Image (cartoon, grey):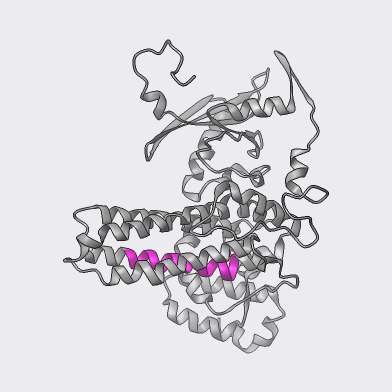
Amino acid sequence: MSEYIDNRSNMKSNKEQRQKVLKEIILQLHDGKDPAEVKEEFAKLIEGVSASEISEMESGLVAEGMAVEEIQKLCDVHAEIFRGAVTQIHTTSKEEEKPGHPVRVLREENFAIENLLKNTLMPKVAALTEETLAERRYELLEDVNLLLDIDKHYSRKENILFPYMEKYGITAPPKVMWGVDDEIRVMIKGFKALLNSPDGTVEDLKAAAEAMNTKILDMIFKEESILIPMLLETLTEDEWVEIALDSDEIGYCIVSPEAKWSPSRMIPFGAPGEGNAAEAVSNAADGLIRMETGILKVDELTRILNTLPIDMTFIDKDDNVKYFSQSAERIFPRTKSVIGRSVQNCHPPSSVHVVETILEAFKAGRKDHEHFWIQMGDAMIYIRYFAVRGEQGEYLGTLEVTQNIAPLKAIEGQKRLLSENF
């Protein structure tokens, strides 16, 4: 790579050369080169790397055949190499600094997560001894349970922000980041399991906490320095409005938005009139759906589907999400931003192969259904997939049906009378 050192002034204006250097750095890490040595070389070669360039670099590596999982393994090293060298994207309107804006919410949550780790959880872990472990165990469990709230932060990112990135052709960074999110989820649950285990030693707890802490703080850095600048550079104000509307469905991590956000050009949420996106949705014109066995108004059909005690998601023949129901007790989060999204991008990299296997079997006509069941706390989640076919047997898409069947499994005997509180 020394051939580029004499041409640094040209590289600043030569995007192609900079991309080549970035890829070369990551490939050197992939081949086992010492990160400290690579970081020193990186500092000599490039001053101020933009978030979009890192995104293009990762996409380029995937396009050239490197597995997402391989980039994911090196993701923490990438963050350390690029730390301090990423050029921030500054917007002129600063709408993202207003209370309730999705970017401000992300940053406030990151601050709360970092504060919980640095000022509460990690100091307590550092002070642990074998003698104090028993008395501090439940206090630490309370802190870890609060930290598990991070799932909402990651879930909003994966189910709301990533679809917009994919719409603009930014595909590799979301896949890599989702994989690391899942690793963090596993690490937090693993730390909690150690706290609950009588065999968990102080040494084990400290090692697990340190690894978890490092991983989470690195993800905060990636979100602040790469993800958020990339989103601000790419998304329109109208898209941020939709993101704000969708966010409430999933919920928030540790802290909640101070207020509902709407751009300066729009009437605030809840006020009637033009520009209120929530009202625009509710005022959609009714129509009639004519079927073989009856005719329903759009509103009637929507309410029927949402009343069923199951979650339904329909994926069309091209693997794009086309519809989902909104039952009262949704099991897995869905937001309107997933409509039109490739179903492969709606799953973490670790489980995409299962989805593709099912769809391939449905399309080939080898199977018409598949099912799974998983325990989630007290709930037993039954997940079924059905191939939807036309009159001639042609594949039209796949219907996913999810239900908590724990109450059904608990049924015994008979019930022939009205409930007492009827």
User: Which quarter of the figure is the N terminus placed in?
Assistant: bottom right
Could you tell me which residue is drawn at 54 percent across and 79 percent down? 84
Q: Determine the image quadrant of residue 5.
A: bottom right
Q: Residue furthest left?
A: 131
Q: Nearer the viewer, residue 47 or 196?
A: 196
In the rendered view, tell whether residue 384 sits above or below residue 321.
above
Residue 342: image x %, image y %? 63, 44
> In the current view of this chain or complex, which residue is farthest to the top?
416
**Residue found at x 58% / y 60%:** 173
Q: Position of residue 406 (x, y in %)?
A: 39, 29
**Which secondary structure is most common in the magenta stretch?**
helix
Foreground of the two, 403 or 146: 146
Q: Is residue 403 left or right of residue 260?
A: left
Against 110, residue 404 (above or below) is above
**Quadrant of the rendered image containing residue 97:** bottom right
Q: Which residues are magenta?
A: 209-227
Q: Residue furthest bottom?
A: 6
Q: How many marks?
A: 0
Which residue is nearer to you in this view: 24 or 357?
Answer: 357
Where residue 401 appears, x then y in whole percent?
Answer: 53, 30
- Residue 223 falls within the magenta-colored stretch: yes
- Relative side of 97 to 236, left or right: left
In the image, residue 167 above or below residue 52:
above
Residue at 64% in and 49% down? 246
Relative to 129, is 67 on the left or the right? right
Q: Is residue 143 visible?
A: yes
Residue 58 position by quadrant = bottom right
Q: Is residue 91 located in the magenta-colored stretch of the structure?
A: no
Q: Is residue 311 above or below residue 94?
A: above
